Image (spheres, rainbow, N blue to C red):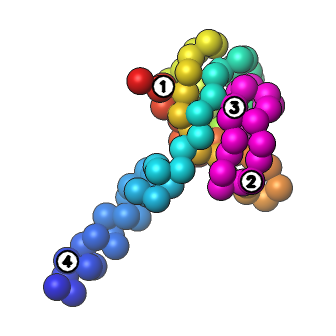
Amino acid sequence: MKSLVALLAAASLFSPLSVQAAAELSEGVVKKIDAPTQRLMLAHGPIANLGMPPMTMMFKVKDAAMLKQVKEGDKVRFRVEQIAGDYIVIHIETAK
């Protein structure tokens, strides 16, 4: 049993998004992509983990490669975290 717990704990270190965080994805629409500054503008619904109401705003992305996963007009599900005073998209996927 201890080895199973250790294995699950180790696997969670490599998981890009925890199960809990995945359940807390917010929804929005990509309005603008600004690759040079590694930001994107999202018109989004409530962001529960930040207590943020619906609005349209620019967000930094954790990795510039994330900007290639979406295009303007895409409906997306995403996770934002507040890191060092900035709101940063740490996960984004197109909505199905």
Residue picked out by circle 3: 44
Residue picked out by circle 4: 4
Residue 8: where, in percent of width, then height? 28, 70
Q: In 3D space, how far apart are the residues under numbered discs 1 and 3 (Cα atoms)?
A: 13 Å
Residue 40: where, in percent of width, then height? 71, 27
Q: In 3D space, how far apart are the residues under numbered discs 2 and 4 (Cα atoms)?
A: 35 Å
Q: Mark 2 or mark 1, which is nearer the start of the sequence?
A: 2
The answer to whether residue 36 is magenta is: no
Which sits in the foreground, 23 or 63? 23
Residue picked out by circle 1: 94
Examine the rendered structure and indicate whether residue 94 appears above or below residue 20: above
Q: Find residue 29 and report its image quarter.
A: top right
Q: In 3D space, how far apart are the residues under numbered discs 1 and 2 (Cα atoms)?
A: 23 Å
| Image disc number at residue 36 | none
Q: Find residue 49 and report its image quarter.
A: bottom right
Please state which amino acid type lies under the numbered disc 4.
Answer: Leu
Q: Is residue 35 left or right of residue 58?
A: left
Please state which amino acid type lies under the numbered disc 3.
Answer: His
Mark 2, secondary structure of its residue: loop
Q: What stretch is highlighted in magenta?
A: 41-60
